[in-house]
């Protein structure tokens, strides 16, 4: 329980930092009081004026909440994939999700341009799910086993990336916009976007969290799982589908953000052990807080300009990934 308390405190602190940081100088105590005032049965006077409240609740808080949802979804998806493949170095990018989203977004930008901005997140969402579906079907056709599925995911990702590169080569005027999306950003966050992805993330989170015990059994081996009456192939399909839905919902509104799904679950294992009944929910909480802080850095470190959030997570995640490689003696979790 201590790990859960620490995770909740970390997320709350990240939300408070994200809500206070920015060009407009908000009173820290007033900001905290205004946020607490929105909780049920809590009534506090913040002292913030109408303009400050508009900045807090219409500009900063939607971005903070969306960042928390995206970070939690990516971390949960990464932990789920690592449980399926029994490999701490796996995340959604290795199973066609990121490549599919990138191709979908590129098609929307190249062929629709600015005529239909709402088509971009839809195309990324559909592309992400399609990439995982093709990878899973290709892996299933190649035979049983997680290694076959992982190799199929890598092959599909390379193919989709090649198609994306071809499209960009034929439409060089769209390269800057495509790469801006690929590097990730939450600058256009709104409450509407949050409401759009919330149902998908709710379904994905429920599905994956309910399979924590099954992933613990799978980590021992398929034979042990079958002896307990479980169906490893069916469990993997359901968990992969849930993780794909979580990752697709995240990238649809944020673009591609790397390393979150690798480094957060690995750090959680160091903190709370290897049981997925703890790793999955804790990864979601810590991932939410981590991305909120990363986004806060992205929009403040070079203010008034803004760094792509994918650059920030890469700068943090690359050294952490090297540390994971050095500290992991076995790829089995």
Image (spheres, rainbow, N blue to C red):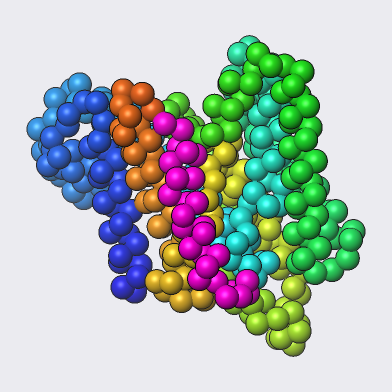
User: Residue 52: horizontal and vertical position, in percent?
Assistant: 19, 26
Residue at image position (67%, 46%) is 97
- Looking at the image, residue 222 lies above or below residue 255: below
User: Residue 175: horizontal and vertical position, in percent?
Assistant: 63, 21
Q: Quadrant of residue 181?
A: top right
- Stretch of the chain drawn in magenta: 307-333
Left or right of 17? Residue 97 is right
Asked whether residue 49 appears in the rendered view, the answer is: yes
Left or right of 199? Residue 267 is left
Asked whether residue 198 appears in the rendered view, the answer is: no
User: Residue 81: horizontal and vertical position, in percent?
Assistant: 63, 61
Residue at image position (70%, 31%) is 104
Name the one closer to the observer, 209 or 103. Answer: 103
Q: Quadrant of the C terminus?
A: bottom right
User: Residue 7: horizontal and vertical position, in percent?
Assistant: 34, 62
Residue at image position (17%, 29%) is 25
- Looking at the image, residue 161 lies above or below residue 79: above
Number of labels in the image equals 0
Left or right of 160? Residue 301 is left
Residue at image position (46%, 33%) is 308
Based on the picture, tell me whether residue 218 belongs to the magenta stretch. no
Name the one closer to the observer, 177 or 321. Answer: 321
Secondary structure character of the magenta stretch overall? helix
- Looking at the image, residue 146 lies above or below residue 172: below
Left or right of 251? Residue 7 is left
């Amino acid at each position: 329980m201590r790990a859960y308390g620490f995770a909740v405190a970390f997320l709350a602190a990240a939300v408070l930092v994200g809500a206070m940081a920015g060009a407009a100088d908000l009173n820290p105590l007033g900001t905290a009081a205004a946020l607490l005032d929105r909780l049920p049965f809590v009534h506090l006077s913040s002292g913030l004026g109408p303009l400050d409240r508009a900045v807090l609740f219409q500009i900063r808080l939607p971005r903070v909440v969306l960042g928390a949802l995206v970070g939690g979804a990516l971390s949960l998806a990464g932990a789920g994939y690592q449980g399926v493949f029994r490999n701490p170095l796996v995340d959604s990018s290795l199973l066609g999700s990121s490549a599919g989203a990138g191709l979908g977004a590129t098609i929307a930008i190249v062929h629709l341009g600015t005529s239909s901005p709402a088509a971009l997140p839809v195309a990324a969402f559909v592309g992400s799910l399609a990439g995982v579906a093709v990878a899973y079907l290709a892996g299933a056709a190649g035979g049983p086993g997680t290694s076959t599925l992982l190799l199929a995911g890598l092959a599909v990702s390379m193919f989709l990336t090649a198609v994306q590169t071809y499209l960009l080569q034929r439409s060089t005027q769209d390269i800057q916009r495509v790469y801006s999306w690929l590097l990730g950003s939450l600058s256009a966050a709104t409450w509407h976007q949050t409401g759009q992805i919330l149902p998908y993330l709710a379904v994905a989170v429920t599905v994956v969290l309910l399979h924590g015990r099954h992933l613990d059994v799978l980590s021992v081996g398929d034979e042990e799982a079958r002896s307990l009456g479980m169906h490893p192939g069916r469990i993997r399909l359901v968990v992969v589908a849930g993780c794909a839905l979580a990752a697709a919902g995240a990238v649809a509104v944020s673009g591609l953000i790397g390393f979150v799904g690798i480094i957060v679950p690995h750090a959680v294992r160091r903190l709370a052990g290897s049981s997925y009944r703890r790793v999955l929910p804790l990864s979601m909480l810590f991932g939410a807080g981590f991305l909120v802080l990363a986004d806060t850095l992205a929009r403040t470190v070079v203010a008034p300009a803004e760094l792509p959030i994918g650059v920030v997570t890469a700068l943090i995640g690359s050294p952490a990934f090297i540390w994971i490689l050095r500290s992991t003696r076995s790829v089995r979790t």
